[in-house]
Structure formats: structure tokens, C-alpha cells
Image (cartoon, helix red, strand yellow):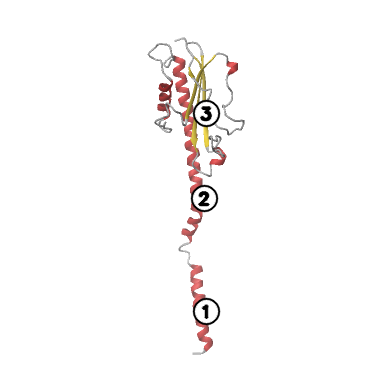
């Protein structure tokens, strides 16, 4: 065998192997899936979290309307010496029961709020109705200012305002920069989505 023939044999073999490798498409789908899987699942998780957060916001609004209606009709009263009287802790428990299907209250939530904040008060002048979310700072993402919150529903024929706030922690990084609007104390970046629901009613003459 000549030297040229011997030297060309490895080149022919490598050329043959390379052609087979390029022409083999058996692993193409797996490689494409591996490349696209991460962004695909990020989009899926972001969509699911957005949907769940929207559902939670509707649930909070429904609970606010339900409890406000019970105050309006006299099913819930405050400091009137009636069997329908509720303390702040009892009212918070009733509110937690309304949203329990999706948003659970912690064991200490009734005494030391961590996520759910309620402001229930009598309004003597509708012109003084607080129009904005109370915040500690001037920024639109500043932490919630709860120092003025109270529990003092109005009596028969009086106006009562019920405001509910819930901290919803956003998990998906892809969604967080676009939906978060609450920066907890001690943090530099918004992390939570603040859900807000408000209802104002004039109590019946029960």
C-alpha cells in the first residue's frame, strides 16, 4: 500500500464521520427543548402568578364588600352592648375566614398583622374621606403607613369606611419589576404587590 493511500484513509474516515454527525437529527429536538425550556417555563410561571394575584385581589374586594354590608345591616356592630358586637380581633378573624380559600392568615395575624391590614372607621364628613393609600414616604412604592388605622365602625344611620390592604409577595423574578408597588421597611427594592380594597356604606337604621 502506498504512503498516499495510507495517509488518505484517516481523512476519509473523519470526513465520513463528520457527514454522519451533521446529518443525524435524532438529538435536535432535545437540544432545542433544553434551550427554550427555561424562558418558556418562566413565561408560564409568570402568567400563572399574575392570574393568581388577580384572583386574590378580587377575593379581597369581595371580602371587603361582604363585611361592609354586614356592618351596614347591623349584623356586625361595635361597642353597642348587643350580641352582634365584635372586637377588632373578631372582625379580623371574620375577614380572614372570607379570604381563607386563597390567602391564609398567620397564627399571629389577629394580634400582630403581617400581611392583612384593616382600617374600619366612622366617617362624619365625606369630604374628609382619605383618597390615597397611606404611605410612610412620598414614593409610590414606600411602605404602608398603618399608624392611623383603627377599628371604630359607625352606628345606625352613620357612614362607615372599610379599607383592606394585603401584602402579596411576588415570587417570579420576571414579574416582580412590573407589578410590585410596596417596599417593606429595611429593603431597597419593591418586593410585594399591595392589594387594596375599599367600601363605604351608610348604615341602616337597625
Residue placed under numbered mark 1 in the picture: 11
* 27, 74: nearer the viewer: 74
User: Of the residues tagged 3 and 2, which is closer to the observer?
Assistant: 3
Q: Residues within 10 Å of mark 2 (few under 14, many from 20)?
A: few
Residue placed under numbered mark 2 in the picture: 39
Residue at 58% across, 21% down: 130
Residue at 57% across, 29% down: 136
Residue placed under numbered mark 3 in the picture: 196
Task: Give the Cα distance between marks 3 and 2.
Answer: 31 Å
Answer with the quarter of the image where residue 105 lies.
Answer: top left
Asked which secondary structure carries label 2, the reply is: helix
- In primary-sequence order, the first of circles 3 and 2 is 2
Asked if the residue at tag 1 contacts the one at tag 3, i.e. Cβ–Cβ closer than 8 Å, the answer is no
Query: Could you tell me which quadrant the C terminus lies in?
Result: top left
**Image coordinates for residue 164, horizontal then vertical, percent:** 49, 26
* 24, 118: nearer the viewer: 118
User: Of the residues tagged 3 and 1, which is closer to the observer?
Assistant: 3
**Image coordinates for residue 150, horizontal then vertical, percent:** 50, 20
Task: Single out the residue that lies furthest toward the right.
Answer: 138
Task: Single out the residue that lies furthest toward the front.
Answer: 186
* 1 over 154 or under it: above or below: below
Amino acid at each position: 500500500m502506498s504512503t498516499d493511500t495510507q495517509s488518505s484513509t484517516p481523512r476519509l474516515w473523519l470526513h465520513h464521520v463528520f457527514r454522519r454527525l451533521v446529518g443525524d437529527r435524532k438529538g435536535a429536538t432535545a437540544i432545542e427543548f433544553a434551550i427554550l425550556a427555561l424562558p418558556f417555563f418562566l413565561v408560564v410561571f409568570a402568567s400563572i402568578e399574575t392570574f393568581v394575584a388577580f384572583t386574590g385581589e378580587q377575593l379581597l374586594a369581595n371580602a371587603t364588600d361582604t363585611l361592609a354590608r354586614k356592618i351596614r345591616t347591623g349584623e356586625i356592630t361595635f361597642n353597642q352592648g348587643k350580641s352582634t358586637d365584635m372586637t377588632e380581633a373578631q372582625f379580623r378573624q371574620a375577614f380572614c375566614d372570607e379570604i381563607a380559600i386563597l390567602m391564609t392568615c398567620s397564627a399571629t395575624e389577629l394580634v400582630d398583622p403581617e400581611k392583612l391590614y384593616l382600617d374600619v372607621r366612622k366617617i362624619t364628613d365625606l369630604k374628609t374621606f382619605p383618597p390615597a393609600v397611606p404611605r410612610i414616604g412620598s414614593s409610590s412604592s414606600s411602605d404602608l403607613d398603618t399608624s392611623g388605622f383603627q377599628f371604630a365602625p359607625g352606628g345606625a344611620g352613620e357612614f362607615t369606611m372599610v379599607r383592606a390592604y394585603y401584602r402579596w409577595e411576588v415570587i417570579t423574578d420576571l414579574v416582580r419589576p412590573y407589578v410590585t408597588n410596596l417596599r417593606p421597611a429595611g429593603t431597597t427594592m419593591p418586593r410585594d404587590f399591595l392589594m387594596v380594597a375599599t367600601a363605604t356604606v351608610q348604615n341602616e337604621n337597625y
